[in-house]
Amino acid sequence: MLWTMQKTYWKRSTIKFSSSRVEDILHTLKALEAQIGNLRQLGNSGSSKHETPKRHPTTSIVDESDVYGRKNEIEQLVNRLLSVDIDGEKPSVITIVGLGGLGKTTLAKVVYNDPRVQNHFDLTAWVCVSEQYDALKVTKTLLEEIGSSGSIADDNLNQMQIKLRKQIKGKKFLFVLDDIWHDNYIDWVDLKSTFVQGEIGSKVIVTTRKDSVALMMDTEPMYLKTLSSEESWSLFERHAFKNKELREHPELQEVGKRITDKCKGLPLALKAVAGLLRLKSGIEEWRIVLRSGIWEQSLISSAGILPALQLSYNDLTQNLKRCFAYCAIFPKDFAFDREYVVQLWIANGLVQQLQTDKTIEDTGNRYFLELLSRSLIEQESKKFMMHDLVNDLAQFVSSNLCLWLEDLQGSHLLERARHLSYSMKYHEKFEKFKLLYNLEQLRTLLPVNQFMFNWCHLDKEVLHNIFPKLVSLRVLSLSNYYITELPDILFIKLNQLRFLDLSYTHLIELPASTCVLYNLQTLLLSHCQYLVALPSKMENLISLCYLDIRASPLLKMRLEESKLKFINVLLGAKCVIGGCDGMGIEELGDFHNLHGSLSILELQNVGNGKEAAKAKLSNKEHLEELSFEWSQMEPDDSQVERDILDNLSPSTKIKELKIGGYRGTKFPNWLGDQSFCTLVNLSLENCNNCDSLPALGQLPSLKFLIIQGMHGISKVTEEFYGSESSKEPFQSLVELKFNCMPEWKEWHVLGKGEFPKLEYLFINDCPKLIGKLPEKLCSLKMLNIWKCQELILEDHCQLNQCDNLHDFAVTHLKVSNRLKPRRLLIPTGLKDFRV
């Protein structure tokens, strides 16, 4: 059809094309037609012509000799099945969660067939639920499994569920619901209601790839991990060398172990690759498989790995599919930030804002969490990654639109690329970027700092002569480049930019041409240590929604003059109150979507509590870190100072709080209130007029507490623990520091284990402190006492219930040479002792 349309156009057109030009157009049209076919095949999973292979129903049969590396998980699961829950829940649900191909079903099979388990339960049943949840099918299968199918009509769900309830009444049962994707809570409650007649101790095992299913079950899930290198090799060896004598093929072992590493501990991948190689006995055939850049794809299409992963992909909405495919721009094993990825999606138009009461960032975060819950993205501490096989799937479904620059030397794929990433080098030379000169279709150019260089050098010629040619760019990152200035032509030409990352650069100022980027939505300026001001016409950035200025010295930024109050996300703002360059505290009230961290400086310029209340900090629920700073000046009225801080009460969702230089004598009541249930880190510094500490002991999540430079404190009393509450104080505190407390003399202790989780205790420069320290510090790992001349360490019941410090749990002990220990016995586990 495309061929016929093109011929008709040529006959009618008055434009004359050269023969070579015509051939180029035909080639492009045919390539586009092929791409459209591929996209249809991927997008229409229900099509009979291109239908993705469905997952075969599972059974409870298992070859236990084929199970490797799951001994601990098997024992843990068996123990949970044989135990009786304290709360008497009927039935108790155990959810096994993990990526497709990781062995969830296999683990469930082994435990299901364990003699201890089979002898423990009166009834056992196995149901493969799969993608399409059908309550009728599940109920019918359970009845058949327990031998109770009868004359009930196949379409009568009510009668079937009534019969199932009767059959399990008073009996202890184990049901396995394998491969659940459906996360509708109402449907789950309806199904679970048929199980409540079972005996206490009844269990249901659920296997799933989706975190949302585990959440729906309201139970502590068991997350399955990948196999170790040794376990992977044992499994690979069993299948790859089944028809070979291992000792006769030492050369295959070496190559086989390298291929095993590529499978990243996925049992399904290991079996599939080994099953292919066991039919090949030549070393060169194995090496070809090892060297192949797309060997995973050829295997998965025939051996089940791609279908296993693609089930997760096909279950996504179209928007999520596009977002997932875009993640192919990241290299394998690369750790990325959630917010960064969401902003990249937004810049490329992949996130659709469907709800008027939600920001586009809210929608993007929901997309990300959905991919995370389906194990298409994995969390590694605070970063996120994609498993190699998932990355391969993303590459496959992106149809070569997301590519790696280093792979494109001499490749015809470059002209089709829309999104490029590349590995940063310490010195980026002009020759590296010559390939980009005519790529007017490019939308994303993203450097990846895999080697964690502090800064890389970029030839100026690239900024002047290469990047300005990429006129269709939506995303440009210059992060971590040693750049002190940017040419005007860069932004004049790249006026389609939606996303600009200049973080970790040495820019002193942004050029005025930055303000012609009318389409710019995201601007990242964090950790620009020399950047002291923004351009004067920032209000021209009419599309700007996300601004990150964390750890950049933009102290002179007046939010009102910068016209930034309509930004959805503002990270790391520092606001100077009053003075020539400062702002009014009330101006903060107009910024409804402050995110991340906010520092409010020079608070002595706030007149009273009513002014402070206009900042509306309690409404700013996206703020995670907040810092209040006063200059060291004597207050006119301590009660006014308390009213000011009282009216600066933040949202109860705050995680970190610092109060420095506060001039009142008492802290407000909100500080220490249990409603601040997410507060983890608290610092009270140089509040010299305060004569008592706030009641902090009942903050449920507080882990880190610093009390420093409090010259007015002479006693730490029972008030510190929040003693009015019946709850034990400081249940989460891990680290406690007292620094520079010159008048502190007494520490009242409750003697009931008030710091049960405390691991690090620092008491420095408290020269008048005498008396006892808290007792029963059974979790303490480090004790640091310095410049506390009057403090006496007794050898009896001073720091715990032991008879002397010799039995103390501490591993690192540092005491001042001016300390007065009556008798100090060295703890047995001590690793570091300094005097």
Image (cartoon, rainbow, N blue to C red):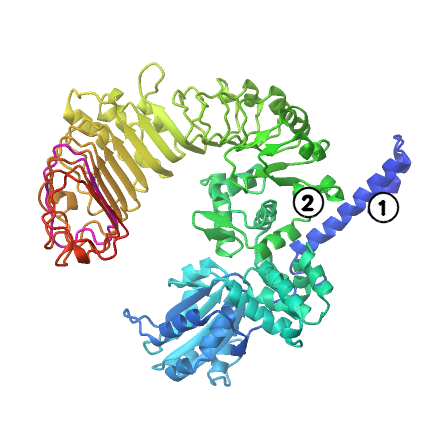
Of helix, strand and loop, which one carries label 2? helix
Residue type at the position of mark 1: Trp
* Rendered position, 825 above or below 13: below
Q: Residue at x 66, y 66 (%)?
A: 251
Q: Which residues are magenta?
A: 741-765
* Rendered position, 761 above or below 515: below
Of helix, strand and loop, which one carries label 1? helix
In the picture, the disc for residue 3 is 1
- Residue 652 percent coordinates (x, y): 29, 41
Quadrant location of residue 494?
top right
- Residue 521 percent coordinates (x, y): 53, 32
Q: Is residue 136 visible?
A: no
Q: Relative to 209, is 291 on the left or the right?
A: right
- Residue 481 percent coordinates (x, y): 55, 31
Residue type at the position of mark 2: Asp
* Rendered position, 228 above or below 567: below
Q: Relative to 88, is 292 on the left or the right?
A: right
Quadrant location of residue 624?
top left
